[in-house]
Image: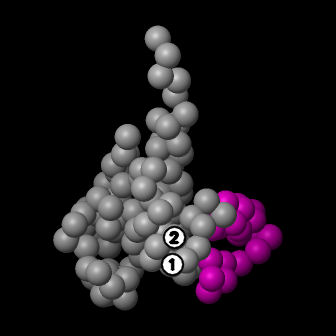
């Protein structure tokens, strides 16, 4: 079951979705494993917030790709090109948005792992 969340970015509401299809879309678009990338980015984000590290270009690219896939799932009007999608925002704060995307992913995983037995 898909999970939806609306996050305000650059003063406007943006819908995001996570589902079992998210890893497939991510893999098809970017040729990478979303689970590995999210774990890596989550670990890096934690070390940055503790003052031990800095985000690199690849970290920002993973974040942008993840946000794009989750927004594209939720909104069919999203541009087909990630650069066109990013152009609609003047600011896109990873420190504000990434934790919310991780929460969305966690809610999706929790829904998948619930027992179907009664």
CB under 8 Å between callouts 1 and 2?
yes
Whole-percent x and y of residue 15? Answer: 29, 59
SS assignment at label 2? helix
User: Which residue is rendered at x = 52% and y = 23% of the image?
Assistant: 115
Quarter of the picture containing the N terminus is: top left
Quadrant in the rendering for residue 76: bottom left
Along the viewing direction, whichever of 47 and 65 lies nearer the viewer? 65
Number of callouts = 2
In the image: residue 13, left or right of residue 67: left
- Which residue is under mark 2? 27
Whether residue 67 can be seen here: no
Separation of residues labelled 1 and 2 (CA atoms):
5 Å
SS assignment at label 1? helix
User: Which residue is rendered at x = 52% and y = 28% of the image?
Assistant: 114
Q: Residue furthest top?
A: 118
Magenta region includes residue 78: no
Along the viewing direction, whichever of 50 and 59 lies nearer the viewer? 59
Whole-percent x and y of residue 35? Answer: 61, 59
Q: Which residues are magenta?
A: 37-59
User: Which residue is rendered at x = 62% and y = 86% of the image?
Assistant: 57
Which color mode does the image show? one colour
In the image: residue 109, left or right of residue 15: right
| Circle 2 Cα neighbour tier, 10 Å, few/some/many (<14 / 14–19 / ≥20) | few
- Which residue is under mark 1? 30
Whole-percent x and y of residue 18? Answer: 42, 53
In the image: residue 43, left or right of residue 12: right
56 relative to 111, above or below:
below
Whole-percent x and y of residue 118? Answer: 46, 11
Whether residue 16 can be seen here: yes
61 relative to 99, above or below:
below
């Amino acid at each position: 079951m898909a999970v939806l969340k609306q996050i305000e970015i650059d003063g406007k509401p943006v819908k995001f979705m996570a589902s079992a299809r998210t890893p497939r879309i991510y893999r098809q678009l970017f040729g990478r494993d979303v689970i590995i990338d999210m774990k890596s980015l989550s670990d890096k984000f934690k070390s940055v917030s503790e003052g031990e590290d800095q985000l690199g270009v690849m970290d920002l690219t993973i974040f942008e790709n993840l946000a794009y896939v989750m927004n594209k799932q939720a909104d069919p009007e999203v541009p087909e090109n990630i650069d066109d999608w990013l152009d609609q925002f003047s600011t896109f704060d990873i420190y504000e948005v990434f934790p919310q995307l991780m929460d969305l992913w966690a809610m999706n995983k929790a829904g998948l792992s619930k027992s179907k037995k009664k």
